[in-house]
Amino acid sequence: RPDEHPNGRLHAKPPAPPPQIRSMSLLREQRERLREEVVAGRRQAVDRQHTLGKRTARERIDLLLDEGSFTEIDMYRRHQAHGLRIEEQRPHTDGVVTGSGTIHGRRVFVYAQDFTLFGGSLGEAHASKIHKVMDLAISTGSPFIGLNDSGGARIQEGVMSLNGYGGIFQRNVQASGVIPQISVVLGPCAGGAAYSTALADFTFMVRDTAQMYLTGPDVVEAVSGQRVTHAELGGAEVHGGRSGVATFVHDDEESCLEDVRYLVSMLPSNNLDLPPSAPSCDAATDVRPRLAEIVPVEPNKPYDMRQVVAELVDDGDFLELHENWAPNVICVLARIDGDVVGVVGNQPMVLAGVLDVAASQKAARFVRFCDAFSIPLVTLVDVPGFLPGTDQEYAGIIRHGAKLLYAYCEATVPRIQVILRKAYGGAYIVMDSRSIGTDLSLAWPTNEIAVMGAEGAVNVIFRRELAAAADPAELRSELVAEYSEQLVHPHYAAERGLVDDVIDPVQTRSAVARGLAMLRDKRKQPPQRKHGNVPL
Ligand code: HXC
């Protein structure tokens, strides 16, 4: 009762407000009612969502954006479709909440599908709301984030749903390399919706509740007789570890959305901006004695390249992409001396850090992202070569390895190569060598750079001599020593200008920081052309 004071005493009714204010308060009331209706969704469906460990679309937006920053667009929108009784249900929002807000004070545009309405399925109105925020994100140069929880194309709306997806894909592609695009999968992401996540720069998934596939388990069984669960077909583990579709996998929605915020904090708003810098607690000139301890001198002893990264970057803090897919190469975003860098590193702990099909794809896509968004590249090299074998050749390692080569060759951002221990053959060239355009190549004094290892090289070039030798073992060890002495040391490359400096391992952080400062104003225009023909 508006005339009752909270302390229980009755007050005289205030005079009626002037008509303008009355209409404003009417509008407010109406919006509140509408919000109630759409916020609550269908109570049962909301409860089900919560029981599954999922949040509603608005709860997710609240977690994602800075408090109170969300401005909703198109809350009144509802479908105009007919047939199959769909006209009996015309909820406002049409099952997707769209608008804009800020993350750490920087503008982003967002949509969040509402599974409680039509299972978050995408019809004409739903799609056109997403198109609108995508257009605004592109025209304002702001990151775009999609929170997906949907049964895919709205079956009742037929081809209009498919048309809606096409419009999203078209915009995904127009926005590619212009604004960062982030796709978050928090429930089903069936059929066409999956393509939008594949076109985004980063895809997040949550364990147990998120699934992504083009055709669901029922269709799989009908077509092939194979019985498979939703999780086995397209759960977060599958896409985070096997297919490489998911860039990040999280245990719950809270940590997932928190990491989306962290990621956004390291990205520029668009391709004309620079990534935001942040003060570091560490001095870039620090000496890092741990570096010499982490990397063993023995060339084949494994170690964790992530420990090297932690020593090199500010506050030991970094965000690793595709942690469980192609772990023989690591790709991380971090800061050095306050500025964002993309670090690519061989991982000697997995398959001795060789390059294979998946590792080449993973690193290539990361290099291209960094290049598109002005993020300098630091490449940490400790690589025995490409993985040999029929599996790899049949899977097209030549084509996939070429992607990484292509990505580095066309990158115009500042590029620094650090060769820690060894760099052999084609993998040496591909890992951002001087010949393909690195700006600064640094090498540790213990490293080996050569066409191949000493044993293999001696077997090839002295095959006849070894076969004829009275004591082949003795001759082999003599030749191996000769090869190592003459060819396998950093000064061989440094004397020829392929390594710019041989550095003390403990000084690596400061050497890289100085290099980045030196290259900060790098400008390089790629040649005029419609687009290159990257080997896909
Ligand atoms: C219309 C849909 C729907 C859809 C779900 N619903 N998917 N309505 N179109 N595609 C509705 C359900 O009827 C139900 O409505 C509510 O959403 C919740 O769905 P449930 O099935 O009860 O939920 P759940 O058991 O959790 O299963 C979720 C699901 C399942 C796995 C996503 O709904 C499902 O398999 N849906 C169909 C998925 C699909 O094949 N989509 C088409 C993909 S083809 P009520 O009223 O009962 O609450 C596609 C083509 C695009 O997308 C290709 C472009 C390249």
Image (tube, rainbow, N blue to C red):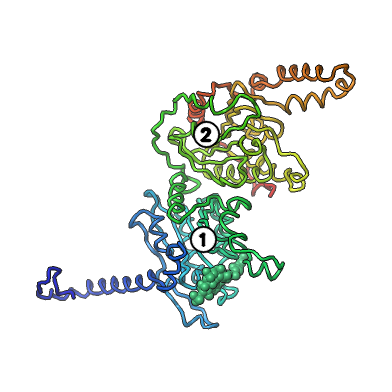
Which residue is painted at 58% across and 34% down in the image? 379
Report which quarter residue 211 is drawn in.
Answer: bottom right
Which residue is painted at 72% across and 67% down in the image? 224
Residue 137 percent across, percent down from the top left: 46, 56
Verify CB contact (< 8 Å) between mark 1 and mark 2.
no
Report which quarter residue 527 is drawn in.
Answer: top right
Q: Nearer the viewer, residue 24 or 443?
A: 443
Residue 535 percent across, percent down from the top left: 70, 47
Q: Is residue 145 above or below residue 501?
A: below
In the image, the residue with mark 2 has its CB under 8 Å from the nearest atom of ligand 1 = no
Badge 2 amino acid: Gln
Residue 313, disc:
none
- Sequence order check: which comes first, mark 1 or mark 2? 1
Q: Is residue 469 above or below residue 342?
A: above
| Total numbered badges shown on the rendered structure | 2
Report which quarter residue 213 is drawn in.
Answer: bottom right
Reading the image, the residue beneath label 1 is 209
Residue 466 percent across, percent down from the top left: 85, 21
Reading the image, the residue beneath label 2 is 307
Badge 1 amino acid: Thr
Residue 533 visible within the image: yes
In the image, the residue with mark 1 has its CB under 8 Å from the nearest atom of ligand 1 = no
Q: Nearer the viewer, residue 48 or 402?
A: 48
Q: Which quarter of the figure is the N terminus placed in? A: bottom left
Residue 162 visible within the image: no
**Numbered disc 2: secondary structure:** helix
Q: Quadrant of ligand 1?
A: bottom right
Which residue is painted at 63% across and 42% down in the image? 407
Residue 266 percent across, percent down from the top left: 46, 44
